């Protein structure tokens, strides 16, 4: 995130929440601890505000840009990790009631629809001025959420047909 602009840990938390936090989970503490570790490693610098709250603003160094470039050049063949509470509950739904299953399907449908709608709104806000690759991440997010939304809509239709 510092490759785009210098930031305090709080600003990093805000940026992550509006961008990569949509698809990569971060412990908020990591956004406060990691910049200090990166500074120790010479990958970022820290400038401390003189007075006030003495906020630290972090900036990426040339060595940090080189490390980022090296990381970007590595292969990325890992399987996508899916941690979806809806799929977990669906797997064990034999034990639940038909009402539980219907509520699960409806809740997951609404959740994925809301997230896709949110991504679409973000896309419309940034499409004309944001980094091309940031826009592409939102486009994939929209497609993913719409696909999962459609799955749950179809499942609700199956449940309706059965009852």
Image: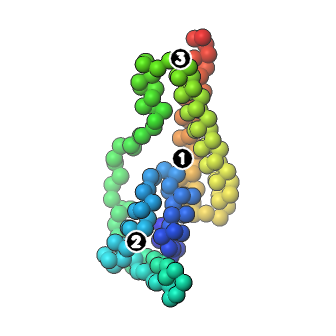
Quickly name the residue at label 1: 140
Binning the other alpha carbons within 10 Å of mark 2 as few (below 14), some (14 to 19) or many (20 upward) gives: many
Q: Residue at x 42, y 57 (%)?
A: 27
Q: Disc 3 or disc 1, which is closer to the eye?
A: 3
Work out whether residue 69 can be spotted.
no
How much space separates mark 1 and mark 2, taking CA atoms?
Answer: 28 Å
- Answer with the quarter of the image where residue 129 lies: bottom right
Q: Is residue 110 left or right of residue 84?
A: right
- Badge 3, how many Cα within 10 Å: few under 14, some, many 20+? few
Q: Is residue 83 above or below residue 41?
A: above
Residue 136 is at least partly visible in this image: yes
User: Which mark is first along the chain, 2 or 1?
Assistant: 2
- Residue density around tag 1, few if under 14, some if 14–19, many if 20 or more, within 10 Å: few
Q: Which residue is at the front of the view, 43 or 9?
A: 9
Camera-near label (1 vs 2) is: 2
Which label sits on residue 98?
3
Residue at the image position 68 percent from the left and 57 percent from the top: 125
Please name the residue shown 65% across and 59% down the image. 126
- Which element is circle 3 on? helix
Mark 2 → mark 3, Cα distance in angstroms: 49 Å
Disc 2 marks which residue? 35
């Amino acid at each position: 995130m510092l490759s785009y602009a210098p930031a305090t840990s709080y600003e990093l938390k805000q940026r992550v929440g509006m961008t990569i936090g949509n698809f990569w989970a971060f412990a908020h503490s990591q956004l406060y601890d990691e910049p200090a570790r990166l500074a120790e490693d010479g990958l970022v610098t820290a400038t401390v505000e003189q007075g006030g709250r003495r906020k630290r603003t972090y900036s990426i160094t040339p060595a940090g840009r080189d490390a980022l470039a090296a990381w970007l050049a590595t292969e990325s063949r890992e399987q996508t990790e899916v941690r979806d509470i809806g799929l977990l509950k669906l797997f064990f739904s034999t034990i639940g009631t038909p009402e539980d299953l219907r509520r699960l399907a409806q809740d997951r449908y609404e959740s994925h629809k809301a997230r896709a709608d949110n991504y679409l709104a973000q896309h419309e806000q940034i499409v004309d001025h944001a980094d091309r690759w940031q826009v592409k991440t939102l486009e994939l997010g929209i497609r993913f959420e719409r696909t999962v939304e459609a799955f749950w809509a179809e499942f609700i239709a199956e449940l309706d047909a059965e009852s």
